[in-house]
Image: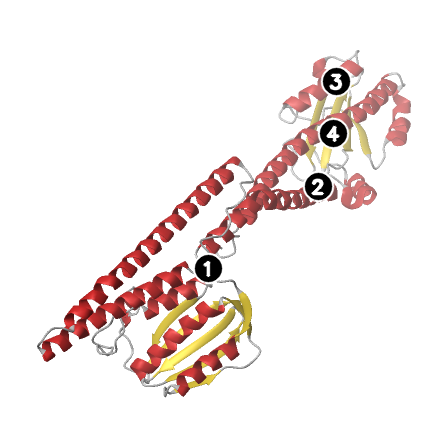
Amino acid sequence: MRHLAPRSLAGQTIIVLLLGLGISHLLSMVIFSADRSTGFALFSSRQALHQIAAITRLLDETPPQWREKILGATDSPAMSVSIAPSAQLTAQARGGIMNTLLARYLSALLDSKLPDQVAVAVFEQSGRYSGVPALPMAHTQMMEAMFHSHASGRILGVSVQLQDGQWLNFNTELPERDSIWSTRAVLSMLLMGIAVVVFSLWLIQRLTRPLRVFAAAAEHLGKDMDAPPLVETGPVEVRQATRAFNEMQERLRRLVENRTRMLAAISHDLRTPITLLRLRLESVPDQQERTRMLASVDTMDSIIASTLSFAHEDARNEEAVEVDLGALLDSISDDMSDAGMQVECDSPAGVIYRCRPHGLRRALTNLIENAVKYGASARVDLSKTPAGVEILITDRGPGIPDSEQDKVFAPFYRVEKSRNPDSGGVGLGLSVSRAIIDKHGGEIELKNLPQGGLQVRVLLPG
């Protein structure tokens, strides 16, 4: 059930509104139906009591020899009328607030009758009170035939004592009570549900639009630190969150700029003393010692050059354009093949992608060079996926231990045991590549192949 529940704010809000309003609407219908049923029963019973009072007055004023004819004329499928020496209703059947109210009402209509001469009871035909006889079979069948499936099963029983001491007994079926699950009730709930869904969707979409913009901006922040600030719209809470996000973006931008500027300045300032140190080392008389010291200076110079390049790449804000990735990979592979490297490329033409071409070229070049350097050769495969573009770079080297695969993307980190320590790299190639791929919203994954070798998977979103 948890998987079927909506996860969006709009879906959860609609579910809560529908459940709350549906339950309250259903309870209101039940309460209203109960009150309406009681009122309807009183109203219909009073109508029957007026007819009973008229028949009673007529029989009181009629000679006994004419009563049988009057009873035959008044007896009908809707009402059974009979005269008996005793009342059909027992004291138990007469109890209840509603029965007492109806009995008082009939006594008021028959002002010549005392309260103990009138008895009224409303009961179910299928579950009569003890002491209440059933309607005669003929009357029951006639009433069912008359009302068909609309028979309610609720009987109004009345006993009135005549002036000569005989009891006049009446049994009549009350009209049917409407069920709360009537067509109108179901239609009302359906219309309410549709109105809640439509209005909630409109309102929630309007209220959550700033949140969607906020989420998109947060995702875009990792790609472009110089993106324009968000417009502060929506409820107060969303405005506060947007303002805090804009301030955070500005602080991050200044932090990155200051870090990049400081790194570039330090690397640039170190160039001058290294050059002076190299000139002074030329005068060292010991040839062997001079060679070793110059090699150390060259290593320092290479590290500084790589650091400067990393800082400049991090600060570059290249314009994004559409390029043919297949042609870009073919160009990189051809340049490396011309330099004597073993690179095989399978990249179909026509894979157009919007990117920063110089930065992406550098990132892919670093990855392919690493594959050739540490795996003797590289194979590059390009394909389109439903999510975007996939680039696979496979080598035949020793691979990288699983525990080291996340660490190799850190600046200046090198896996000495699995990579060639004499390669000359300083551990910035993968860091630069990952930074560039991250700016494009992509991902880099490393995977050791079962048959040996390392596969680098670059995923670029569509």
Instruction: Please say whether residue 439 is visible from this viewpoint.
Output: yes
| Mark pair 1, 4: CA separation | 80 Å
| Mark pair 4, 2: CA separation | 22 Å
Relative to 407, 12 lies left or right: right
Q: What amino acid is at disc 1?
A: Asn
* Sequence-wise first label, 1 or 3: 3
Element type at mark 1: loop
Crowding at label 3, few (<14), some or many (≥20) Cα neighbours within 10 Å? Answer: some
Residue hosting label 3? 105
Crowding at label 4, few (<14), some or many (≥20) Cα neighbours within 10 Å? Answer: some
* Sequence-wise first label, 3 or 4: 4
Residue hosting label 4? 40
Relative to 74, 332 lies left or right: left
Q: Is label 3 or label 2 in front?
A: 2
Instruction: Please say whether residue 449 is visible from this viewpoint.
Output: no
Q: Residue 380 got which mark?
A: none
Q: What amino acid is at disc 4?
A: Phe
Element type at mark 2: helix
Relative to 259, 50 lies left or right: right
Q: Position of residue 59 (x, y in %)?
A: 86, 20
* Sequence-wise first label, 1 or 4: 4
Q: Is residue 363 above or below residue 80?
A: below
Q: Residue 188 got which mark?
A: 2
> Relative to the observer, which residue lies in front, 433 or 204?
433
Q: What amino acid is at disc 2?
A: Ser
Residue hosting label 1? 317
| Mark pair 1, 3: CA separation | 94 Å
Q: Is label 1 or label 3 in front?
A: 1
| Mark pair 3, 2: CA separation | 37 Å
* Sequence-wise first label, 3 or 2: 3
* Sequence-wise first label, 1 or 2: 2
Element type at mark 4: helix
